[in-house]
Amino acid sequence: MLLELKRIHVPPGQRVILKNVTWVELETILEELGEHRAARIAYDQGILEIMTPLPEHEYNKEIIGDLFKALLEELDIEFVSLGSTTFKNQFMAQGIEPDQCFYIKNEALIRGKKRLDLTIDPPPDLALEIDITSRTHLNIYQGLEVPEVWRFEKDKLKINILENGHYIESQSSLNFPNLPLIKVIPEYLEKSKTAGRNKTIKEFRNWVKSKLGCLN
């Protein structure tokens, strides 16, 4: 399979699906692909998807991630951002590489760790997926028990909250229930495309500060 894998070229915006991939084969494939790569994977019960994102996908991921970090910094909340780290659970036979992910409430539990094992460590508190060149695998996040998943699709932000083992779409974030992020994040993302990244992030920080003043 590794020889075949090396021959596979996945153009940006495309995906390849491999069936009947064992857990041992998945581990070998991940090692062969390495950590510094453009392609991302999703694994569910023997089915492996390999996807390479488009530049638009990466731009949206970076800006939304930067907005989220700015929000946490202005709120003085400790967090760990692990980007597209591979999260997997052998018992569930599932694995995923989010576009971005954050430890917030559980940040202290994984602080300083170089390796994470979801059979003993908590999953990320929030995962971000950009649905331009790939589809969000909510069933995998559900199996891994990720509390909150943000999906950005067709210029809209959808927030999914895990309740009783299933995701429900919510108008507010589990971590920031008093902020209208579902409306504001897409607005600032769009603004960044004309005003630039730095100016947009600065304006967003000012918006967060103004909201904090209203809440206090």
Image: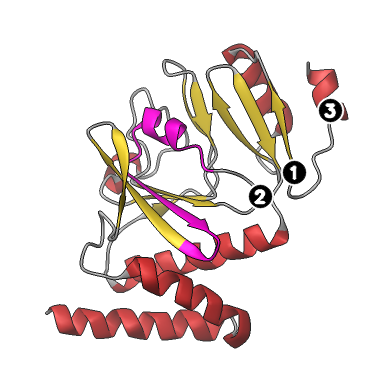
Q: Looking at the picture, which amino acid does disc 3 mark?
A: Lys
Q: Are marks 1 and 2 in contact (CB under 8 Å)?
A: yes
Distance between the alpha carbons at the discs numbered 3 and 2: 22 Å
Residue 197 visible, this orientation: no
Residue 68 visible, this orientation: yes
Q: Is residue 185 left or right of residue 51?
A: left
Against 168, residue 48 (above or below) is above
Distance between the alpha carbons at the discs numbered 1 and 2: 7 Å
Q: Is residue 14 left or right of residue 181?
A: right
Q: Quadrant of the N terminus?
A: top right
Q: Which mark is residue 133?
A: 2
Q: Which residue is mark 1?
A: 14
Q: Looking at the picture, which amino acid does disc 2 mark?
A: Thr
Q: Which residues are magenta?
A: 136-156
Q: Which residue is mark 3?
A: 6
Q: Secondary structure at mark 3?
A: helix
Distance between the alpha carbons at the discs numbered 3 and 1: 16 Å
Q: Badge 1: few (under 14), some or many (20 or more) residues near its Cα, within 10 Å? A: some
- Queried whether the magenta region covers residue 113, the answer comes back as no
